[in-house]
Image (cartoon, rainbow, N blue to C red):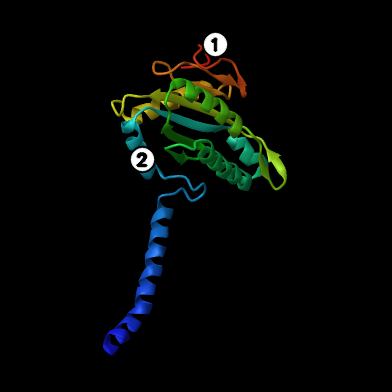
Amino acid sequence: MSELLTAAAAAGPLAAGWSVHSLWLRRRIEAARRDPLTGLLTREIFGRRARKLVRGGAVAVVVIDLDRFKQLNDSYGHAAGDAVLQTTGRRLIESLRRPGAVARLGGDEFVAVFRCPTPSDLSWTLFDLHELLCTPVDFDGCPVRVGASLGAIWDDKRGAVDLSALMRRADEAMYEAKPTGGWCIADGLAPVMTTTNGRRTGRPGAASPAGGTR
């Protein structure tokens, strides 16, 4: 019995060391899965989760690009730009509280895939999300204004359409919205609706003015 107690006592520090090492390793692995600035998923991890979501039912794919971001960096400095990117990432996560995945594609471009039961639900989500992303960001006590252009597509074919194809269509819709700084849903799979400078120009389920969508 005494030998067992001695062995257990000797193994205690070793077990504790392995426990600390395992915790450190898990944190390193988790950090590798995240963008170091925003804490959002890396492309690889996002791709895995997004494909699983697409195969599981109706989803929305949204591509987001910040407007006038270069001018913001030039006017306020890169520290302000970083603050805007961090805030954008946090707002995306907070506003899309449902099964989904959000990533920073690079620079000031983001992508989100999330459960979305109906096209109308996507319309209202984009309306609210655009307003949130255009809310000024506080930097050293000063409100830094930034715009956002959003492109989206709705899909309920459970993986019949490849994720890369959905992202490409959402990206095309984003570039269609870019001149006015609003948002656009790609046609064919959802009602079309855009806004201009945050002001609604259509309503869910209604066609938008010509030239405002793709």
Q: Is residue 180 above or below residue 28?
A: above
What is the x, y in percent for residue 139?
67, 45
Identify which amino acid the numbered label 2 is placed on.
Arg
Give the image location of residue 50, x and y in percent.
Answer: 37, 37
**Residue 84 in view:** yes
Report whether residue 68 is seen.
no
Label 1 secondary element: loop
- At label 1, counting other C-alpha atoms closer than 10 Å, the crowd grade (few under 14, some 14-19, many 20 or more) is few
Residue for badge 1 = 209
Q: Nearer the viewer, residue 81 or 6?
A: 6
Displayed quadrant of residue 17? bottom left
Residue 23 quadrant: bottom left
Residue sitting at 52 percent across and 27 percent down?
125
Residue 98, given in percent of the width and then of the height, sits at 45, 36
Q: First in sequence: mark 2 or mark 1?
A: 2
Side of 145 relative to 160 (left or right): right
Q: Secondary structure at mark 2?
A: helix
Give the alpha-carbon distance from disc 2 to disc 1, as whole Å: 35 Å
Under mark 1, the amino acid is Pro
Q: Quadrant of residue 196?
A: top right
> Foreground mark, 2 or 1?
2
The residue drawn where x is 36% and y is 78% is 12
Left or right of 120 on screen, residue 19 = left
Vertical relation: 83 (above or below) 53: below
Percent x, y of residue 190? 43, 18
Q: Residue at x 47, y 45 (%)?
A: 40
Residue annotated with mark 2: 49
Which quadrant does the N terminus fall into? Answer: bottom left
